[in-house]
């Protein structure tokens, strides 16, 4: 987990003096995550209640369970647990980038599972954007934060159209630039490239068919480093094959089903 901080000088000494002792997630939890046993990884990391990094990792593990549909029988309940862990992490370390990213991801998932009216009332879009902006302020070169920013722009445009763009300030070029920046920072990360390709297909499959197809083909050749990346590479192969053999409509349906 990478953490960064940009604080006014007058607050920096106070922040360091009051910061809790930090401890990485247990190695056993990391191994469980790598094997795709996300619920078990989350539970083990959750026990380390004095560690912001472990609690943020617990949240990340629960979100991975939602993404892969592994050990996530109840999406709302799993997201509630993930949010609780991330908020506890942020309480221990108010500068935690990882906790902010998990909370932003949770807001995005919840927003997708509500109507536009409910999403507007719930404030998911502005909350997610604020968390992403804070993460990037703390750590400007965080690839995951840039990817979440790109996904935020494209998702608001997809669901809200011109009105959503006007209300929330979403912008196509900003979304594409954020995703491109994320890929430049983490060129070997298949999950970032996969979410980029999926966002393009869902936004405008005809316009972005070639670009998404090239991306999916490249992802399929990557060497995954853990179970989550294996899931991503496998999904990319399915999407690429579906796009080539059955066309944009079938690929777009599969892309939509791939999102938690």
Image (spheres, rainbow, N blue to C red):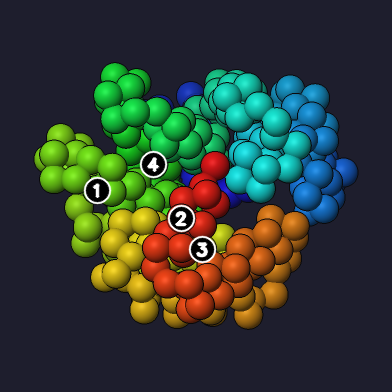
Q: Which residue is mark 2?
A: 253
Percent coordinates x, y for residue 68 in the rendering? 66, 48
Q: Which residue is mark 4?
A: 132
Residue density around tag 4, few if under 14, some if 14–19, many if 20 or more, within 10 Å: many
- Contact (Cβ within 8 Å) of mark 4 with mark 2: no
**Helix or strand or loop: what does disc 4 sit on?**
helix
Percent coordinates x, y for residue 120 in the rendering? 27, 25
Residue density around tag 2, few if under 14, some if 14–19, many if 20 or more, within 10 Å: some
> Which comes sooner in the sequence, label 3 or label 1?
1
Picture layout, residue 75 above or below residue 185? above
Q: In the drawing, what numbered circle is on residue 157?
A: 1
> Which comes sooner in the sequence, label 1 or label 4?
4
Alpha carbons under labels 2 and 1: distance apart: 18 Å
> Which comes sooner in the sequence, label 4 or label 2?
4
> Which comes sooner in the sequence, label 4 or label 3?
4
Q: Which label sits in the foreground, 3 or 2?
A: 2
Q: Which residue is mark 3?
A: 194
């Amino acid at each position: 987990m990478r953490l960064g901080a940009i604080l006014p000088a007058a607050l920096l000494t106070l922040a360091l003096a009051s910061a809790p002792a930090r401890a990485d997630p247990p190695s056993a939890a990391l191994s469980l995550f790598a094997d795709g046993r996300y619920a078990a990884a989350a539970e083990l990391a959750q026990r380390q209640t004095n560690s912001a990094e472990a609690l943020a990792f617990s949240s990340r593990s629960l979100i991975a369970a939602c993404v892969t549909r592994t050990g996530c029988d109840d999406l709302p309940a799993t997201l509630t647990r993930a949010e609780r862990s991330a908020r506890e992490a942020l309480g221990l370390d108010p500068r935690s980038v990882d906790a902010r990213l998990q909370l932003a991801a949770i807001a995005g998932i919840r927003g997708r599972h509500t109507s536009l009216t409910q999403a507007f009332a719930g404030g998911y879009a502005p909350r997610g954007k604020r968390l992403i902006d804070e993460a990037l302020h703390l750590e400007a070169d965080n690839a995951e934060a840039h990817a979440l920013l790109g996904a935020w722009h494209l998702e608001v445009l997809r669901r809200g159209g011109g009105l959503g763009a006007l209300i929330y300030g979403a912008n196509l070029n900003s979304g594409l630039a954020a995703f491109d920046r994320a890929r430049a920072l983490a060129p070997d990360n298949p999950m970032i490239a996969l979410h980029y390709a999926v966002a393009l297909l869902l936004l405008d499959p005809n316009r972005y068919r070639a670009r998404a197809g090239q991306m999916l083909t490249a992802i399929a050749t990557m060497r995954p480093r853990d179970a989550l990346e294996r899931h991503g590479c496998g999904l990319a192969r399915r999407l690429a094959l579906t796009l080539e053999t059955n066309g944009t409509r079938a690929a777009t349906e599969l892309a939509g089903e791939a999102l938690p």
